[in-house]
Image (spheres, rainbow, N blue to C red):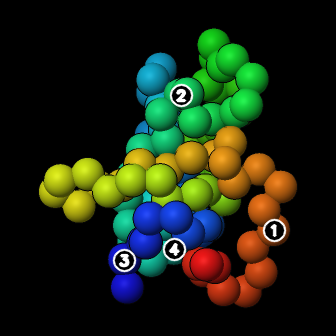
Amino acid sequence: TMAQVGTFARGEVGRVMAYGALVRLEDGSLGLVHISEIDKGFVTDITQYVAPHSRVSVKVIAQKEGGRFEFSLKQAQGIRLEDEDIVQ
C-alpha cells in the first residue's frame, strides 16, 4: 500500500539538498520534504536538521503527478509512531 495524504509515517532520509530532503517511507513511497516543512522555525541550513540515512517521522501532505509525494517534518513533530507504519 502506498502512502495516504493526511497520514503519518516513518522513513529514511536519502539525498539532502539546499531546498529539501528526499525521504523514502517504509512502504517504499518516495517524496520530498521542502525546506519550509522541515521545522516550525525559519531554516537556513537544512543539514542542521536532517542527514542522509537518518530515520524520521513525517506527515504525508500531498501527492504529485507521477506518484511522488510531499512530506512534512514539522507537521509530524511530537507525533509518536508505534509499530504501525502508518497511523490515521
Whole-Å distance between the Cαs marked 3 and 2?
A: 23 Å
Amino acid, disc 4: Glu
The residue that disc 4 covers is: 26
Local SS, label 1: loop
- Counting residues from the N terminus, which is met first, the one under dot 4 or under dot 3? 3
The residue that disc 2 covers is: 35
Count the marks: how many? 4
Decide: marks 1, 3 in contact (CB < 8 A)? no
- Counting residues from the N terminus, which is met first, the one under dot 2 or under dot 4? 4
- Counting residues from the N terminus, which is met first, the one under dot 1 or under dot 4? 4
Rendered residue at 73%/86% (across/down): 83
- Counting residues from the N terminus, which is met first, the one under dot 3 or under dot 2? 3
Rendered residue at 81%/68% (across/down): 80
Q: Mark 2 or mark 4, which is nearer to you?
A: 2
Local SS, label 2: helix
Local SS, label 3: loop
Rendered residue at 16%/57% (across/down): 66
- Counting residues from the N terminus, which is met first, the one under dot 1 or under dot 3? 3
